[in-house]
Image (spheres, rainbow, N blue to C red):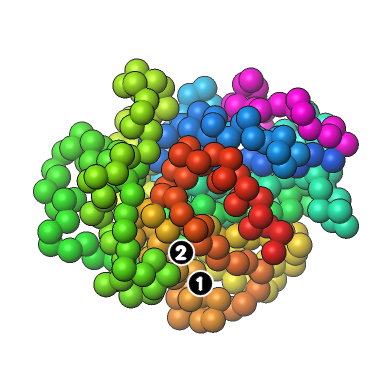
Amino acid sequence: MSNCVRIDNNVNFFYEDSGTDGLDPSNYTTIVFIHGTGYNATVFRKLFPFGPNHNCRIVSLYRRGYAPSSPWTEEEVALFTSSDLEDGKKFLRLAGLQIARFLLGFAASQGIPKYDKEKDTGGIVLHGWSLGTLFSQAVLFALDSLTTDELGQLENYLHAIVCHDPTAITHGMLQPPLPESSPWWQLTTVSEKWAFFKKFITGFYVHPNPYSHDLADLNLDKFDENRPHSLSELPEEELEQILSFEMYATHDAAPFTTVDLEAFRFANRRALFDVEMAKYLPDVRVRIVCGIEGSGLLLFFVNGMQRALKDPSGVCGKGAERAREYKVVHLGRGNHFVFWDEPSWALDQFVACLKD
């Protein structure tokens, strides 16, 4: 079923909802998924039937710009199409505040169970995927902008954030150089890039060593031609209902190309590597998750965050220090769409990674 939460300034966030059938109404956990680039909230629909296995309600949020959620305003677009550092910071703070207020509005309107720390039940897990990780982590960056009442209410519910296959900008990392033989160099138009992106992101990759920090051990862009891609079983008309070329070509592309990278590095440091910021919602668990059969680019960013556990300032910039607890988890199999290909197993892994 679909529903909507209205937050400040008449911003509407629509979401798909698995509902509460088969759940214990007194202590179920809500997992809120945030989708990535070019794929809307319906991409998580195959997870819905398996929520009761874990007493979990599955909610899939449509990001701003993806109908039926509200489009970005001209003033907001100006922030994430600006190269000014302060504009970039304002956008990330705004993005984090809006997601936090969606969570508060959802919790209040649905009367969901609060988090019970002793039993580890109830509350909300915020699960960002791909570009969606930028928005889930932005919540941690923006906590000090919430009112005291909002912060207190959020602490009653939010107890974990999962960053699944984060992009380079989520953690403010430079993208590694692609080899001269990379197909990306041969693409000139947005339409050509979109066509290849859909193959690139849904493919399966074999890596010499997926846990390595050495680029030579990671297969960046040569997917297995002999293995069917994720979503390849869908008829074209069904696939089109999940996709958004317009957002890929415009608003989702803009942060990668125009926003000052230092804005993302600054936000990442405040979210994870700032002792004072970690005092806000100090018990929130953070997991950075990656499948070992996705593109080596995704593995490179995740493995970089694993390296940051030992060398925060070396990876994330001057001033970064161990602050908020987080762990890096490599899924034993699966590509970028493991939740589509193996929804039951994937949900098992998403829940299990929070228990260690």
Residue 241 shows in the view: yes
Please state, as top left, top right, bottom left or bottom right, where the N terminus lies in the image: top right
Question: In the displayed structure, would residue 58 be above or below residue 151?
Answer: above
> For residue 198, which quarter of the picture?
top left
Q: Which of the pair 194/266 is nearer the observer?
A: 194
Picture quadrant of residue 287: bottom right
Looking at the image, how many numbered discs can be counted on the residues?
Answer: 2
Q: CA distance from mark 1 to mark 2?
A: 6 Å
Residue 153 picture location, percent across and down: 81, 46
CB contact under 8 Å: marks 1 and 2: yes
Amino acid type at mark 2 = Val
Judge left or right: residue 290 versus residue 217: right
Q: Which mark is residue 302?
A: 2
- Tag 1: amino acid: Gln
- The front one of 159 and 5 is 159
Q: Is residue 328 above or below residue 238?
A: below
Q: Is residue 267 magenta?
A: no
> Is residue 313 something one can see in this rendering?
no
Residue ranking furthest to the top: 237
Q: Residue at x 26, y 50 (%)?
A: 224
Q: Which residues are magenta?
A: 1-26
Q: Measuring from the top left, give residue 208's x and y in whole percent.
A: 31, 68
* Badge 1 density bin: few <14, some 14–19, many ≥20, Cα 10 Å: many
Tag 1's secondary structure? helix
Q: Please tell me which residue is depicted at 28% across the width and 59% down the height of the picture.
A: 220
Q: Nearer the viewer, residue 84 or 161?
A: 161
What x and y, as percent, mark residue 194?
26, 37
Residue 6 lies in magenta, yes or no? yes
Which label is found at residue 273?
Answer: none
Residue 306 image label: 1
